Image (cartoon, rainbow, N blue to C red):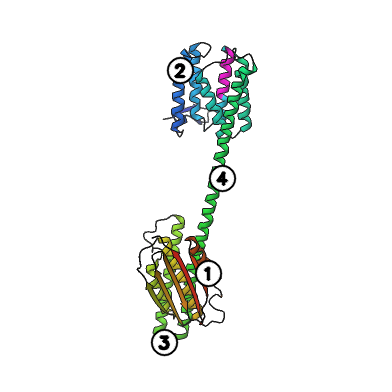
Amino acid sequence: MGSRLCLETDDGAGKSIYVEQVNPLRAIRGLPRGDVAFAVVLAALGLVDAFVGGWRGPPAVNAVAVPLMALALAWRRRYPVAVLAFDVVALSALAAAFGAPETSTGVFILVAAVFSAAAHGSKPVATVALSVALSAVETTLDPLIHTFGDAAWSIILVTLTLGAGFGMRARMEALERNQELMAAAAAEEERKRIARELHDIISHSLGVLVLQAGAAEQVVERDPERAREVLRSIRATGQEAIGEMGTLFGLIRGEPVASREPQPSLSDVGKLVEKMREAGLDVRLDVEGGARPLPAALELSAFRIVQEGLTNALKHAGSGHARVVLRYADDELEIEVADDGSSVNGNGSGSRRGLAGAGERVALFGGRLDAGPRPGGGWSLRAGFPLGR
C-alpha cells in the first residue's frame, strides 16, 4: 500500500502538506497480461543476450539497459509513443557510446515498439519521426554498414513495420465505426419498438376509456347499476394500461419486472375479447388448429395486432359485430380481425399510424399484413407470421 509523507510549513500556521507515495505495483495494474508476459520474456532474453549476444559495450551496462527497454513494452498499448521514444533514446545512447548492436533481441524490441506506436498511438507524425530517427541511428552508428545495400534492411524493416501498424490501426478504426453504426441502428430499432408499444397501449386504452365513458354517461340516470359496471370496467382498463406501461418502462430502464404484470401474449386474447364485449362490441373468438407456445416477441406482436384490429372495430363498428380468428398452421400463424361496421369513413380513418405500426411488427418476422374494406361492408385486418417447423 502507498504511504503518506507529511511536510510541515515554516510559517507557524499549523498547516501540513501531505504527499502520497504511490506504490509502484499500481502502475502495472490493468495492463494486458499478454503484454506484461511478452515484456518479461523479452527482458529475460535481453539479459542473457547482454552477456552472450552482439551487444557492444560493457555487459553490466547492457544487462541494465536492455531489460529496461524490453520491460517498457508492457505499457506499449497505454503509452505507445512514449514507449517508442524511450526505446529509441536508450538505443541511441547505447549506439553513440558503444556502437549499434547486432542482436535479435534488439530487433524484437524495436519492431514491437514501432508497431505498437503505429497501431495504438494517437500521434502518427511523432511515430514516423521516431521511426526515421531509429533507422538513421542504426544506419549511421553501426560500424558494419558501409553501403546503401547494407543499410537497406533497416529502412525496409522499419517501413514494413510502420505499414503493418498503421494498417492495423485503420482496421480497428473501421471495426469501431461499424460497431457504432450497428449500435445506432439497434438504438433506432429500439426507439421504434418503444414507440409501437406506447402507441398500442395508449391508443387502445384511451379509445376504450372514451367509449366506455360515453356509454356510462348515457345510462347513468336510467340504469345506475349498469353505469357502475361501466365505471368499474373503466378503472380496470386504466389499471391494466398503467401496469403495461410500467412493465415497458421497467424493461427500458433494465429494472427487474418480476413483480409486475408480464407482457401480454396470445393467451390474453380471450381477456381482450371480454373487455371489448363489456365496451359494447359483440366479438366472437375462434381458434383453429393446435395452439402452441410461440416466441414471446412474436406472441406480443400478434396480441398487439389483434388489439389494434379490435380497437378500430370498436371505434367504427360501434355496437356491431366482430370476429377474431387465430389459425395455427404448421408453418404460419394467421390472424384475422373482421367487423361489419358501416361507418362512412371506414375503419381506415384515423388508424393509419396503428396500421403502419402493425406492418412494422409483421415485417420484423418476415410476415405479411393486409387491411381493407370488406365487400359486404365493414373492415378486415389479416396478418401472417411465418413459423419454424
Three-letter amino acid code at disc 1?
Leu
Q: Given this view, does label 3 or label 4 mark the residue nearer the observer?
A: 4
Q: Are marks 2 and 1 in contact (CB under 8 Å)?
A: no
Q: Which residue is mark 1?
A: 355
As displayed, is residue 175 above or below residue 362? Answer: above
- Looking at the image, is mark 3 or mark 4 earlier in the sequence? 4
Label 2 vs label 3: CA separation? 100 Å
Q: Which quadrant holds residue 133?
A: top right
Q: Looking at the image, which residue is at 47% across and 19% down? A: 46
Q: Nearer the viewer, residue 54 or 326?
A: 326
Label 3 vs label 4: CA separation? 66 Å
Three-letter amino acid code at disc 4?
Arg
Disc assigned to residue 177:
4
Q: Which residues are magenta?
A: 86-97
Q: Given this view, does label 2 or label 3 mark the residue nearer the observer?
A: 2
Q: Are marks 1 and 4 in contact (CB under 8 Å)?
A: no
Instruction: Please provide percent x and percent y for residue 225.
Output: 39, 84
Residue 235 included in the magenta stretch of the image: no
Q: Nearer the viewer, residue 111 or 288?
A: 288
Label 2 vs label 4: CA separation? 42 Å
Q: Which residue is mark 3?
A: 223
Secondary structure category for the residue under label 1:
helix
Q: Nearer the viewer, residue 155 or 111?
A: 155
Q: Given this view, does label 3 or label 1 mark the residue nearer the observer?
A: 1
